[in-house]
Amino acid sequence: MSNVMAVGGVLAAALFASTVTTEPLAEPAERITISVETVNGSGCSAGTARVSTAADDTSFTVTYSDYYVLGGDGARPTESRKNCQISLRVQIPQGLTFAVAQVDLQGYAHLQPGATGSQHSHYYFMGTSPTAQTSHEFKGPYSDFWRTSDRAAALVYAPCGEDRNLNVNTELRVDGGGSGNGTSFMAMDSTRGSVRSLYHLSWREC
């Protein structure tokens, strides 16, 4: 197949708690830095996830190098579901706050007829219970790159003046469709092309 799957969705409105009411900024006047504090999960062992910030500070990218799941013939049960949780420290200029406005994820899937794959995500600031959750399903036969794009229904910003890590959680699953159906896989790693996870940010003054 040569088509690229693009699936749109909506992030849950209750993402982060904030009382900010000012208009969004195009970008902060000073540079921000984003660093990885912790990485956990079967889909991102140590050293296999990297984060980079866009030059205009309006987005950041997460790149994985060993994040895939297998299902069907020859695959072990533990290989059909993997997850990755990344805790990010976002250092921003004083007097500003930010929200995750849109998330664009990419990957590659090879699904036999009858097989299915899925990608799940949620995002939240450490110490807060509200999360934004997204879920996308893929059906075989399919053998190509995939892409999902989710825009927040309502921008909700991080608490002003508080140091809260941003937690990014993703999960991949694949169901091979039964014995004798061959092997299927779904991946979200850069070894299968220029694959990245892009998180768009919106800025406001406190």
Image: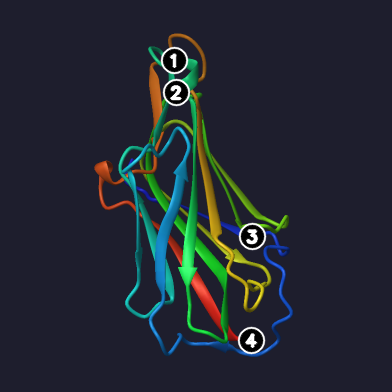
Where in the figure is residue 55, as x and y percent of width and height?
32, 77
**Dot placed on the residue nearer the N-terminal end, 3 or 2:** 3
Disc 1: which residue: 76
Above or below: residue 153 compared with residue 48: below
State yes or no: discs 4 and 3 in contact (Cβ < 8 Å).
Answer: no
The residue that label 4 is drawn on is 206
Q: Quadrant of the N terminus?
A: top left
Q: Are marks 1 and 2 in contact (CB under 8 Å)?
A: yes
Amino acid on which disc 3 is placed: Leu
- Foreground of the two, 31 or 137: 31
Residue at the spot 69% in from the left edge and 83% down from the top edge: 20
Query: Label 4 sits on what residue type?
Result: Cys
Q: CA distance from mark 1 to mark 2?
A: 5 Å
**Horizontal arrangement in the rendering, residue 4 relative to residue 127 (left or right):** left
- Secondary structure, mark 3, is strand
142 up-or-down from 73: above or below = below
Which quadrant would the C terminus be assigned to in this image?
Answer: bottom right
Q: Residue at x 43, y 9 (%)?
A: 180
Residue 47 picture location, percent across and down: 31, 43
User: Is the C-beta separation of discs 2 and 4 under 8 Å?
Assistant: no
**Which tag is nearer the camera, tag 3 or tag 2?**
2
Q: Which residue is mark 2?
A: 79
Residue on which disc 3 sits: 11
Q: Earlier in the sequence, mark 2 or mark 4?
A: 2
Label whose residue precedes the other's in the sequence (3 or 1) = 3
